[in-house]
Image (cartoon, rainbow, N blue to C red):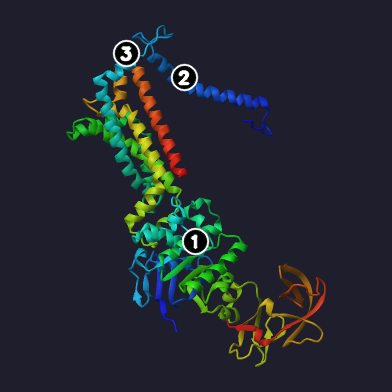
């Protein structure tokens, strides 16, 4: 079992009257890829600034490998960060950028260069980049240089402040996978912050979701997806179908607006609240197929999302969102039957 | 170069633009050309057209011990003003453009005020204060007076450079283990260097050519502009335009040299 490398105990941060983060308790294990996700203003930037040592918590303790580091400044913590702007040194070459932390430690020029080139290669950049200027590098190359510089520091924990947010979709996807790969190979603890849950899902071992300065849920991508702690988390993943319901009996829930009946998720203690069904959990049924509940509807809209397709289906007063593989024999105006199984939905009391 | 005429412009308007540019350039440079011509006259008096030509006034300027003294005073003042103003302005520019602090907007306005103050009045005011405090005028007082006017200018020049740099770069260096001093030496200073360099150039040239502040504050000592003025008022010889031409040349070389160094530095 790996050990806890980072622990937050009752951490709070105020700026004057403004509460930026509140009652944060969290622990990150050694070698874990941990991601803090939240919309802007959720306090995740404040969090990471405290973790790297550029801000002090107003209350509570931050522990690294069991030691309290509240008052240890950033330059004496065994951690470093890849900045959102990357913060590459514009007056230094790619090589000098990567060597910077080694130079500070008084490493000989020759060793520094060897290490820098090693890191360049590890990040799929050829040796010729060593003497290039930062301004000659593309966005993706700069990402790699920033990561190489951080790895040269050899931190115990590596922090990331949304470094991929400025890149185009395709490049971002590539770098997400590379980042995960590097994390696995180096075995280092990565703590990443982002506003994109999708990005977090791809890379993380565990995710903490933040909202208004508090942590709403901590869990594996699987847990976050299948058992969102509340509507905020559920919607954070993308559009969902929501029904306001009250319990009819142990098996069935009733829609408080339309009176329609939905199967109750098994073992749910909730009697009144919101039933959430993800669009990809609803199936379009052929004549011989069955689900725990079945509805008839008409396709109103069709949105092609690459390899997947989303239908908006009108079922009486409600418009349901259904997502499935592309190539279905349905089009706008067609009648369809659809349904989902009880264990594919989540019921929460809000 | 063959520039395509714009959608609105015709050949005629393009020609008018060119002529206008030439007129402006002539307007700016004609007085200087007149000064150079005057310095080449053999006759002692200032008159056009020049009948006989000579370089002898240049010889007499370069040979004059008196002028060499003034030159030394000018260089001494300009060099000290450059050094001190740059040191003050680096800190000043960081306060101006980089750090958020209480009273910053007030400071940004106050620091600019001396630039708009009439220099002759500023010079007189400094002289009055110094005599009230029993400080004898001399080159030291002139350095102080120049600083009052030049530090704001240099602060502005360096501020422009400060505005153009991402503060996260300093944080990143600190985060990677650098001490405050290492951050300044390795990151802040080199990034600000182009601004510091042009600031220094400005400081030197503004001090070098300053008359109104020097005239009140140098006391018994004299700078080149003061000597030029004195000679023009009484006892004109073509030494005046000759020295004027030489100092202009020197300033030009300094500027071009600075420009060359600057662009070379950026290419590397």
A225 w.r.t. A58: above or below? below
Of circles 1 and 2, the one toward us is 1
Task: Give the quarter of the image for residue B137.
Answer: top left
Decide which of A114, A172 is in the foreground and name it. A114
A325 w.r.t. B166: above or below? below
Chain ID, mark 3: B
The disc placed on residue B30 is 2
Query: Image quadrant for the C terminus of chain B?
Result: top left
Which residue is labeled 3 in the image? Answer: B236
| Badge 2: residue crowd in 10 Å (few <14, some 14–19, many ≥20) | few
In this view of the protein, can residue A83 be seen by the observer?
Answer: no
Q: How far is mark 1 from mark 2, CA to CA?
A: 59 Å
Q: Secondary structure at mark 3?
A: loop
* Residue B143 place in picture, x, y as percent: 27, 34
Decide which of B196, A195 is in the foreground and name it. B196
Verify CB contact (< 8 Å) between mark 3 and mark 1: no
Earlier residue among tags 2 and 3: 2
Same chain for the residues at labels 2 and 3, yes or no? yes
Verify CB contact (< 8 Å) between mark 1 and mark 2: no
Task: Give the quarter of the image for residue A107.
Answer: bottom left
* Residue B227 place in picture, x, y as percent: 29, 21
Residue that protrudes farthest toward the bottom in the picture: A250
How many numbered marks are there? 3
For residue A286, side relative to residue B104 (left or right): right
In this view of the protein, can residue A292 be seen by the observer?
Answer: yes
A49 w.r.t. B227: above or below? below
For residue A129, side relative to residue A320 (left or right): left
Chain ID, mark 1: A
Which residue is labeled 1 in the image? Answer: A120
Residue at point 43% right, 71% down? A157
């Amino acid at each position: 079992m790996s050990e806890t490398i980072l622990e937050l105990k009752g951490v709070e941060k105020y700026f004057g009257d403004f509460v930026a983060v509140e009652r944060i308790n969290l622990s990150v294990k050694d070698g874990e890829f941990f991601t803090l996700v939240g919309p802007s203003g959720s306090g995740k930037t404040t969090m990471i600034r405290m973790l790297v040592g550029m801000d002090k918590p107003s209350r509570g303790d931050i522990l690294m490998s069991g030691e309290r580091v509240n008052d240890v400044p950033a330059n004496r913590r065994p951690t470093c960060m890849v900045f959102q702007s990357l913060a590459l040194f514009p007056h230094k070459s790619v090589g000098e950028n990567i060597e910077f932390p080694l130079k500070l430690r008084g490493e000989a020029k020759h060793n520094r260069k060897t290490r820098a080139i090693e890191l360049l290669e590890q990040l799929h950049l050829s040796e010729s980049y060593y003497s290039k200027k930062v301004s000659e590098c593309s966005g993706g190359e700069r990402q790699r240089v920033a990561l190489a510089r951080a790895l040269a520091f050899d931190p115990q924990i590596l922090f990331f402040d949304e470094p991929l947010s400025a890149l185009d979709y395709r490049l971002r996807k590539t770098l997400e996978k590379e980042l995960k790969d590097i994390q696995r190979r180096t075995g280092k603890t990565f703590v990443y912050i982002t506003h994109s849950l999708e990005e977090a899902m791809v890379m993380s071992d565990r995710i903490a979701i933040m909202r208004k300065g508090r942590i709403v849920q901590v869990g594996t991508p699987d847990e976050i997806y299948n058992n969102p702690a509340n509507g905020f988390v559920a919607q954070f993943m993308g559009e969902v179908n929501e029904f306001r319901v009250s319990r009819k009996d142990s098996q069935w829930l009733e829609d408080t607006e339309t009176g329609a009946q939905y199967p109750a998720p098994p073992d749910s203690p909730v009697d009144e609240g919101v039933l959430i069904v993800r669009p990809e959990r609803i199936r379009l049924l052929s004549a011989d197929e069955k689900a725990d509940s079945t509805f008839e509807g008409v396709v109103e809209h069709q949105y092609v999302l690459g390899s997947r397709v989303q239908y908006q289906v009108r079922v009486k007063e409600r418009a349901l969102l259904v997502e499935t593989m592309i190539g279905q024999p349905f089009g706008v105006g067609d009648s369809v039957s659809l349904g989902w199984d009880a264990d594919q939905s989540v019921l929460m009391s809000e | 170069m063959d520039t395509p005429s714009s959608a609105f412009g015709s050949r005629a308007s393009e020609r008018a633009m060119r002529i206008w540019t030439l007129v402006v350039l002539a307007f700016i440079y004609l007085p200087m050309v007149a000064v150079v011509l005057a310095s080449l006259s053999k006759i002692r008096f200032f008159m056009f057209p020049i009948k006989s030509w000579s370089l002898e006034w240049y010889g007499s300027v370069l040979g004059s011990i008196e002028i060499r003294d003034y030159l030394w005073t000018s260089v001494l003042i300009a060099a000290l003003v450059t050094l001190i103003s740059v040191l003050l302005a680096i800190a000043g520019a960081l306060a101006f453009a980089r750090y958020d602090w209480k009273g910053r907007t007030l400071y940004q306005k106050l620091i600019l005020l001396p630039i708009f103050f009439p220099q002759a009045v500023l010079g007189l005011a400094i002289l009055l204060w110094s005599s009230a405090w029993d400080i004898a005028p001399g080159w030291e007082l002139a350095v102080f007076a120049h600083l009052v006017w030049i530090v704001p200018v240099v602060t502005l020049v360096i501020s422009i450079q400060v505005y153009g740099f991402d503060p996260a770069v300093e944080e990143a260096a600190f985060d990677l283990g650098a001490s405050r001093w290492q951050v300044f030496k390795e990151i802040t200073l080199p990034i600000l260097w182009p601004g510091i360099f042009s600031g220094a150039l400005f400081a030197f040239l503004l001090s070098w050519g300053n008359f109104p502040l020097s005239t009140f504050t140098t006391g018994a000592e004299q700078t080149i502009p003061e000597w030029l003025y004195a000679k023009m008022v009484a006892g004109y010889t073509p030494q005046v335009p000759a020295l004027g031409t030489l100092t202009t040349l020197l300033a030009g070389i300094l500027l071009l040299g600075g420009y060359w160094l600057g662009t070379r530095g950026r290419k590397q």
